[in-house]
Amino acid sequence: MNDIPPANSPSQSRRKKPAPAGKHFYLLRVLRIIIAAIVLGLFTIAFANIFQLLPNSWGHTLAEFQFTPALQSTLSGVIVPSAIILAGLLAATLLFGRVYCSFLCPLGIFQDVLIRISRMLKTGKAKAFRYAPPVRWIRGTVLALVILSMLTGIGNLLMWLDPYSQFGRMMSMVFRPTLAEINNVFAGLSDTFYHIPPDWIYVGAVTFIPLALLAVIWIMALRKGRLYCNTLCPVGAFLGLISRYSAFRPTIDKSACIKCGMCMKSCKSQCIDLKKGDIDYSRCVNCFDCSSSCNERGIHYRFTWRTRKEGSPKDRSEKSGGRTGKKTEKPQAPSAEQVMNALPSGNRRAFLGATLLGAAATINTKTGNKFTRTASSPAAPSAHAISPPGSKSVRHFLDFCTACHLCLEACPTKCLRPAYMEYGLNGILKPHMDFSEGFCNFDCTSCADVCPAGAIRPIDLAEKKHTRIAKAELHLPECIAACDKTDCGACSEHCPTKALDMVDIQQPTWDADSCILCGDCTHTCKVKAVSIVKDRIVIDYDKCTGCGDCIKTCQGSALEMKKSRWNIRIPKLSVQYCIGCGACEFACPVKAVRIHAIPVHEQAEVLVQKQVEDPNAGKDFAF
């Protein structure tokens, strides 16, 4: 920069006796660092809680104060407290600027940590920044596309770009398994530590997605500071529109500024233009690093909602940083056309998109949540994906889930896994129920308790116990009790609703007078236990599993089920009682019971068991 004096200039020599920065600025920066450290630490523990240091409710409470979960929860119909928190975040931005990005956003704080580590190690280019002109068209385009995807349901850009959700995926899919591996190394050396599954099997090949995003954000932070926050982050772009008109702002005092460039070098947002003596408030995240680096007290934190001096060419921009003692006329509010014309082209698109999103949220609230994003999409939900209990339907879950993976951490049985293509393109990385290594606990609502975005609605335990999220399907030809004529009953023992019950095996008998020898029974039998030999139906009872398929297809009613000579019991499925928890599929050693997804959750019937009368009731003694 040509207007910055050289190091040996008289103005630089005055800095030999540095003046302390403003006390209020110093305290604000210390407060920001303390709050940011607490927020980052708590979020890291919440997403990588391998030692169970925090209850699941803490993670939900923390996530409620994030912008995107509060927005999604409000749109899903959870008005209280989500709408109150969302209004509070917007009000804080209007008053103090983008304090959310430095105080509450875990990904933004994580980038600050990366920059600080780089400066301590003196590596990369993070040790000094320069002013960079704003790229408003990128921010406006990204924000407009995100809003469009939310309204139409085509794609899910918000999930990929939301800073909170990205941080959650990085912690749960990269940091947590790595921390578990480190713990297991110490577990092999000392009895103080116990072995923890590293969860790589739960994550699988999709680990490369958050790992690649982590590498990209890391490189951007080391080279250009908060470049991601000010170009690709939709939350930063939206809050930047509001922070342009914030009440309190850091301002440059031109009378005290010597253009040494120290504030510019410390600005992670690269928004301080010393040539013009101006700060781009749409990119400033209020980290207060510029004030601590200024030894001339050239930056002040001031209230800027003041009327402009009459005849002044500048209205409330506070570029001069001075006060006017003269009375000023109250300016008239600009019209909507003037506001739109004053915005650059990129911000016009973002402003229109934000207005459209606000209107959609209002309509959604006033119409009782009848507004749903159900537009036709090439990435339709797959029939093989099961959404968690409380999500109401697969479509609702895909519309509002941001894949932050807080529910994956809270699930005690680890049956929630990040999806690859089970939901289709629109559901990559979003949780789905996988019963190969676990099942949904009958007495658990952890995923519904921690979901901050309204994708999994809060559900009572009594309601959850008869909410059907999927249906079981029994394949007797594969059951070892029916095929090997041996006792098993693992599926029935694990079924919490008794939709699977063990009954005495029955096998078909043949009536020659009613048989027309059509052969349908022989083609239907999956285990080839029925055959035609010399104009007779021959049944191999050693192979027969008692499934009854042959009777269903018999045209002449020549087959009838009767009690078998085998003294064994086989499972019988009553689908009306099944809730699709997956306990039977998990317990079955040969996977003869398989769970299939349903698009919309249903209410299952409750089995009323007969109470056995006590023969000793009313007697003083039982003997």
Image (spheres, rainbow, N blue to C red):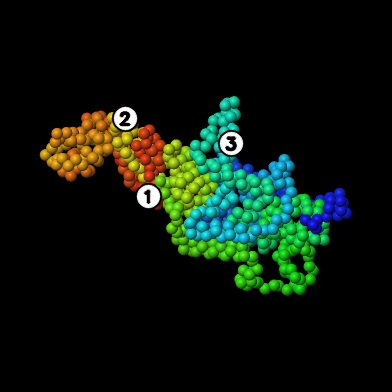
Whether residue 284 sits left or right of residue 550 in the image: it is right
Q: Earlier in the sequence, mark 1 or mark 3?
A: 3
Find out whether the residues at labels 1 and 2 contact each other: C-beta distance under 8 Å: no
The amino acid beneath tag 1 is Gln
Which residue is denoted by mark 1 in the rendering? 603
* Residue 95 seen in the figure: no
Which residue is denoted by mark 2 in the rendering? 487
Picture coordinates of residue 19, whole percent (x, y): 83, 51
Where residue 338 is drawn, which disc sits there?
A: none
Whether residue 260 sits left or right of residue 317 in the image: it is right
Pointer 2 local density, CA inside 10 Å: few below 14, some 14–19, many at least 20: few
Mark 1–mark 3 distance (CA, rounded to whole Å): 40 Å
Residue sitting at x 64%, y 60%: 136
Where residue 179 is drawn, which disc sits there?
A: 3
Q: Secondary structure at mark 3?
A: helix
How many callouts does the rendering have? 3
Picture coordinates of residue 307, whole percent (x, y): 72, 69
The amino acid beneath tag 2 is Asp
Q: Nearer the viewer, residue 309 or 111?
A: 111
- Label 1 or label 2, whichever lies nearer to me, is 2
Mark 3–mark 2 distance (CA, rounded to whole Å): 43 Å
Q: Secondary structure at mark 2?
A: loop
* Residue 370 seen in the figure: yes
The amino acid beneath tag 3 is Leu
In the picture, the quarter occupied by the C terminus is top left
Picture coordinates of residue 311, whole percent (x, y): 76, 73
Whether residue 178 sits left or right of residue 541 in the image: it is right
Q: Earlier in the sequence, mark 1 or mark 2?
A: 2
Residue sitting at x 76%, y 53%: 263
- Label 1 or label 3, whichever lies nearer to me, is 3
Q: Earlier in the sequence, mark 3 or mark 2?
A: 3
